[in-house]
Each structure stands twice: as structure tokens, then as C-alpha cells.
Amino acid sequence: MRSSNPVFSRRGFSRDNGYAGFNAQQPQAGGPAAGTNPYATNPYATNPYATQDAQRGAPAQAPARPGAMTIDDVVSRTAMTLGTVFVTAALAWFLMPVDPANLGRSYGIAIGAALVAFVFAMIQAFKRKASPALILLYAAFEGVFLGVISNAVSTYVSPGVVPQAVLGTMAVFAGVLIAYKMRWIRVTRRFYGFVMAAAMGFILLMAVNLLFSVFGGGDGLGFRSGGLGILFGVIGIVIGACFLALDFKQVEDGIAYGAPREESWLAAFGLTMTLVWIYLEFLRLISILQGDD
């Protein structure tokens, strides 16, 4: 199983039978499982996409083995990372109040924390194995960033925006989870390619807009306010929802494919990054909508 958020991972997906999955091939008859399933310790583990449930399309389950990842592992690790984000965000909110006379200092703290979090995320993305310490450090600094930014937006831009953004993020998570479990969303190779292309285009446009705003002043190309800001806010949320589907697929694959328990940290890492993405897009979108009232 790879880092769940493909934007921050060099490991990506393999493409077997048109689906996103692990770098695995179906074993030859009588051949060993080693070299096919990277987590296999028995001759019965195969490519989860080699056999599909005729009606549900669910991957075939590999026989359980000691130390394999379970859904409880993913839930507990995700709770730890999101809990770390919440605690540090709350501490940043109350211990680093936004000073109206020196907003630059507050934004400087937020940007610095975001850069440190990004560095930890990139280090983890390029590591072959999950590092709980790196993931929790990422979550801690990401929480500081979110706490300062949320406080600033709630105080000076759009009061009450934070609870609405949190509720919106939870609603998207629940909606995508239900749609995925009901098989209304199928993570195919085409779906993955579309999400990656859309995400890269979105990130490049936002980067260009940031450069124009820094050197030209104002809102740059207008992607962060007004009608275009609303449109790109919705697009950002939709891309985040697609990331969630990719995350859910990798969790499902990891459990079905017998991934080692430590891989649940990567699932938590990816889910946390995706939820942060969605929250920030909601924060911006609601601020624009309330500002236009």
C-alpha cells in the first residue's frame, strides 16, 4: 500500500485490469506468491483485481495473517493524526491570537508552520516505510497552520466560517464514503488519471495566481475571489472528494491484500491531508459566499 494521497507521493498506483492497485501481477500456476503480492506470505494471495465479485466488484480477500492491517488500525491511526491536528490547531487559536496591528506576524507563523508541515509530508512521501513520528509531526504543524488561518479568517473575514467549514468537510467525507461503499464510485484507471490531471492543473493555476498576486497585487488572476473564486472553490472540493475515493480504495486494497499493520499509518496520512485540503477549500468558499452577501 502506498501513501494514500497521490499528490504527495512518488509511489502512485499501478494499473492492473484497469484499476488502481498495488504493483502486483497474477502469480503463475504453482508459482510462489513472492514477487506478486508485496505483502504475501502464503501461496494463496493474488492480485486483488484478478478475481472480482460479480455484483459488487470487491477485491478478493487474501487469507488473514498475523500483523496484517485491519480497518480498526486505519481508524485508530487516523484518529490519532486528526486528533493531533485538532489539538495543535486549538492551541494555536488560543495561544497565538491574531493581532490586528500585526497581521503579518500571524500570517508569517501560519506560513512557516505550513512549510514545515510540507517538508515533513515530503520526507514521508519519499520514504519506503511509514514513519509515525514524521506523520504526527506533519499533523502537529499542519494544525498550527490551520489554527492561525482559521482564527484570522473567522475574526476579520467571515465570522462563524469555521464550524460551517468543519461541517462541510464532514458531510463530504460521509457522502463519499457512502457512495464508495454503495459502489456508486468506482476507482478505475481512467478515474485516477482524471483526478491526477485535474489536481495538477488546479495546483498550477493556484500557483500562478499566487505569483500574480504577490508581484501584481490584489487577487492576481481572480481565482480566489468573486465568481471565479466560487467556481474554483467548488472544483477544489470536488477534487478533494475524488482524493477521498482514492484513499478509500487504498484502504480497501491494503486490507484485502494483507498489507502490514504499519501501512495503516500511510492510510491515516493520506486521509488527513485530503481532509485538510477539503477544509481549506470550504473555508475559502464560504468566506467568498458570505462576503458577497
Image (spheres, grey):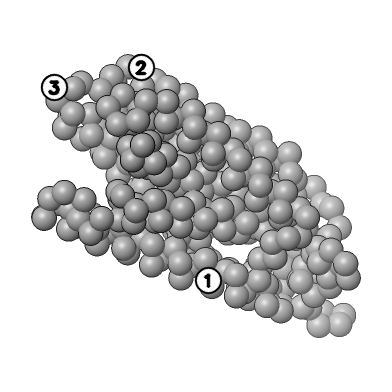
Quickly name the residue at label 1: 194
Q: Which residue is pictured at 62% across the width and 56% down the height? A: 245
Whole-number angstrom distance, CA of label 2 to CA of label 1: 41 Å
Q: Quadrant of the N terminus?
A: bottom right
Percent of width and height locating residue 214: 15, 51
Indicate the amino acid at tag 2: Phe
Q: Residues within 10 Å of mark 3 (few under 14, many from 20)?
A: few
Point out the residue furthest to the bottom here: 28
Instruction: Inspect the image, locate mark 3, and give the three-letter code of the amino acid beneath it.
Output: Ala
Residue 43 lies left or right of residue 154; in this view the side is: right
Can residue 99 be spotted in the picture? yes
Among numbered discs 3 and 2, the one appearing first in the sequence: 2
* Image disc number at residue 286: none
Q: Nearer the viewer, residue 229 or 271?
A: 229
> What element does badge 1 sit on?
helix
Q: Is residue 86 above or below residue 121?
A: above
- Of the two numbered discs 1 and 3 on the same chain, state the one appearing first in sequence: 3
Q: Secondary structure at mark 2?
A: helix
**Type of residue at label 1?**
Phe
Q: Earlier in the sequence, mark 2 or mark 1?
A: 2
**Contact flag, marks 1 and 3 (Cβ < 8 Å):** no
CA gap between label 3 and label 2 equals 17 Å
Mark 3, residue position: 101
Mark 2 Cα shell of 10 Å, populated few (<14), some (14-19), many (≥20): few
Q: Is residue 214 left or right of residue 176?
A: left
Q: Residue at left 21%, top 35%?
A: 108
Percent position of residue 119, x then y? 34, 48
Residue position for label 2:
94
- In the image, residue 80 above or below residue 259: above
